[in-house]
Image: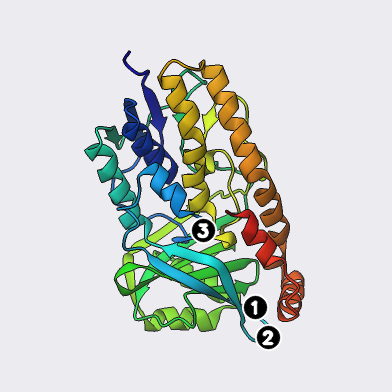
Amino acid sequence: MIPRPIEIIGGGLAGLSLGIALRRAGVPVTLHEAGLYPRHRVCGEFITGLAPATIARLGLENAFADALRHHEVAWFPREGPPQIQQLPAPALALSRYTLDARLAEIFTAGGGKLHANSRADPGADRAGLVCATGRRRTHASSWIGLKLHARDLALTRDLEMHLGAACYVGLSRIEHGAVNVCGLFRRRPLTGRGPGLLLAYLRAAGLGALADRIIAAQIDAESFSAVAALGFDRRTPQTDRVSIGDASAMIPPFTGNGMAMAFQSAELALAPLVAYARGENSWDETRHAIQRALRARFRLRLASAGALHAFLLQPRRQRWFAALSRARLLPFRPLYATLH
């Protein structure tokens, strides 16, 4: 019996990793991606909570073979000294520019059909269709994400997290001696082009010293990326279609868990989709099985991260954050325990 085909719309981490795993199971897969590879994306490029078993199950060992392993995070509140946090397990660091290109190559080498620069419309739910189109935009959002790479930028720890006025910014070492600088900012009436816009936002948020450090480094202007209309959805996946990755729910980026959730959602969807492709389940049964698995895996971590997120963005709450951090009362260890 020829397996039923699967169509995936969205060629980011979730879509590509699911496509790779399905091809390893002998399932015909066609994937549509609106952009081209490789390209830079707004992303922390710091992955917490991704277990080696998930990497192996999806067949991604080669993609992560040379990823950096990070162990410590330094939190820089605007008041007081930095607070050092040991991660419960090593985090992976690799740029999306490199990772997306590798995953696309693995997918096509495994016999997947990849249509880049293809804006397929997911439309209504239909059998065999998986939506992996990335973060859901909302016109009501007041947030903007900005990112760039820089060289010769010394860090105090593997990852630095800087808290500013209605913003936080992460700096993470990635491959080839570069540092990824990625921030979430409340939108302001600022102007600037490329890296200059990120620097303007840093200064407006009271992070002028960090802006000076970046200016003194070697900025890769081609790596600058921006994304607006960001929203963070604590809801569990909707019931009208199969959605994975950010298309189902988006966790606040300070956790470093968004990329891991993309891979984990692909892992959760894999077995039900293989059963559907082999004619063992109907599409409705497959859709509901995937939605149940996503809710069970992600509901607690989305709620926990959303509750802590507010303390990182408002000056008064940031002071509480700093005080609780110094007293070692912040629930980071329980939070990170939910990320796996």
Q: Quick check: 228 above or below 48? A: above
Q: Quick check: 21 above or below 1? A: below
**Nearer-N-terminus badge (3/2):** 2
User: Real-space Cα distance between discs 3 and 1?
Assistant: 20 Å
Q: Residue at x 34, y 81 (%)?
A: 152
User: Real-space Cα distance between discs 1 and 2?
Assistant: 6 Å
Mark 2 lies on residue: 80
Quadrant in which residue 68 is drawn: bottom left
Whole-percent x and y of residue 55?
41, 49
Whole-percent x and y of residue 141?
62, 49
Give the numbered dot on residue 145. 3
Q: Secondary structure at mark 1?
A: loop
The quadrant of the image that shows the N terminus is top left
CB under 8 Å between discs 1 and 2: yes
Q: Residue at x 29, y 70 (%)?
A: 176
Residue situated furthest bottom in the rendering: 81
Whole-percent x and y of residue 195?
40, 68
